[in-house]
């Protein structure tokens, strides 16, 4: 089986914070000492997600741990966003290894963070797990898009992982200062942080469904055209073969003085 050319895929990262993030990552890549490697940054990103999860769990002891969780998000952004940038800057990319490890770590990080959030006193565990499912569903769409179209789409409607982290940090600050007020709805009592998580999860799910439907329709058209083209080629080959056979038969008849068939 041929390996996909991951190095030459189209990368789409049109995020809201891109004008700030891209220069920051380029500057960080230039100033990183030699001992800081992409693998080390990936490890920092993963350990930071562990810090976020543990911090959320410890908010049952004191809400000040929300700030530690926010610091974890910043460190997670640093490690997760800079590892690929640094590899490209130093021209030491390992496309297949990097793609596999980076997204394997991302998956584990997302699960840990949402579980930690669900174990906090602010978010219902079921709501947190629904958030994790939504994020992972979006990730699956991204990976399938990469495999089928060679397009690595990191952002949807200018929202990517960086914006999700920023929303989490903002939510932590809001909850720390005003608490976690509850609202009575037809579904029962719902906390503010539950609403924030549901909003983000719904946003991701809607984006992934829209992209999945659009991509599925586009791929169906491409496959239909390819099938029609193959059928046309086969018909043309059959016509050519028949013409060649007839010419050969005519030539043999002429040689033996026989009238053409």
Image: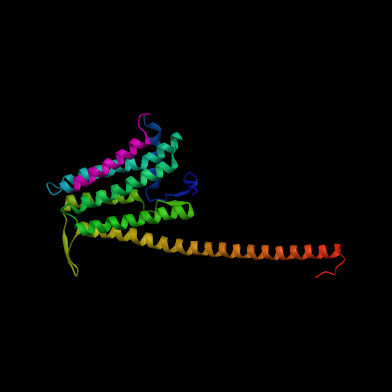
Give coordinates of residue 68: x percent, y percent. 21, 43
Give coordinates of residue 149: x percent, y percent. 48, 55
Residue 39's place in the image compared with 226, above or below, is above
Outermost residue on the left side: it is: 61
Position of 122 with respect to 261 (left or right) is left
- Stretch of the chain drawn in magenta: 34-56
Of residues 259 and 36, which is closer to you in this image?
259
Residue 236's place in the image compared with 164, above or below, is below
Q: Is residue 115 visible in this depiction of the protein?
A: yes
Q: Quadrant of the C terminus?
A: bottom right
Q: Quadrant of residue 242?
A: bottom right
Give coordinates of residue 127: x percent, y percent. 23, 59
Residue 55 painted magenta: yes
Q: Quadrant of residue 69?
A: top left
Of residues 201 and 110, which is closer to you in this image?
110
Q: Residue at x 22, y 47 (%)?
A: 53
Q: Residue at x 45, y 63 (%)?
A: 216
């Amino acid at each position: 089986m041929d390996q996909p050319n991951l190095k030459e895929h189209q990368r789409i990262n049109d995020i809201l914070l891109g004008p700030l993030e891209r220069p920051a990552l380029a500057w960080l890549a230039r100033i990183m000492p030699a001992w800081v490697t992409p693998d080390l940054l990936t490890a920092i990103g993963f350990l930071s997600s562990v810090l976020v999860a543990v911090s959320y769990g410890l908010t049952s002891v004191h809400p000040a741990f929300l700030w530690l969780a926010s610091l974890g998000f910043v460190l997670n952004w640093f490690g997760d966003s800079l590892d690929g940038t640094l590899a490209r800057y130093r021209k030491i990319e390992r496309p297949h290894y990097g793609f596999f490890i980076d997204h394997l770590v991302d998956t584990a990080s997302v699960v840990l963070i949402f579980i930690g959030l669900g174990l906090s006193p602010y978010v219902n565990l079921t709501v947190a797990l629904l958030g994790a499912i939504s994020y992972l569903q979006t990730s699956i769409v991204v990976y399938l898009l990469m495999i089928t179209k060679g397009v690595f789409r990191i952002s949807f409607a200018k929202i990517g992982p960086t914006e999700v982290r920023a929303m989490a940090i903002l939510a932590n600050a809001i909850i720390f200062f005003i608490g976690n007020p509850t609202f009575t709805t037809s579904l029962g009592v719902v906390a503010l942080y539950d609403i924030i998580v549901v909003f983000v999860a719904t946003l991701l799910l809607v984006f992934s469904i829209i992209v999945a439907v659009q991509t599925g329709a586009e791929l169906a058209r491409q496959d239909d055209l390819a099938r029609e083209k193959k059928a046309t080629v086969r018909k043309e080959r059959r016509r050519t073969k028949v013409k060649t056979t007839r010419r050969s038969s005519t030539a043999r008849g002429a040689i033996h003085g026989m009238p053409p068939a």
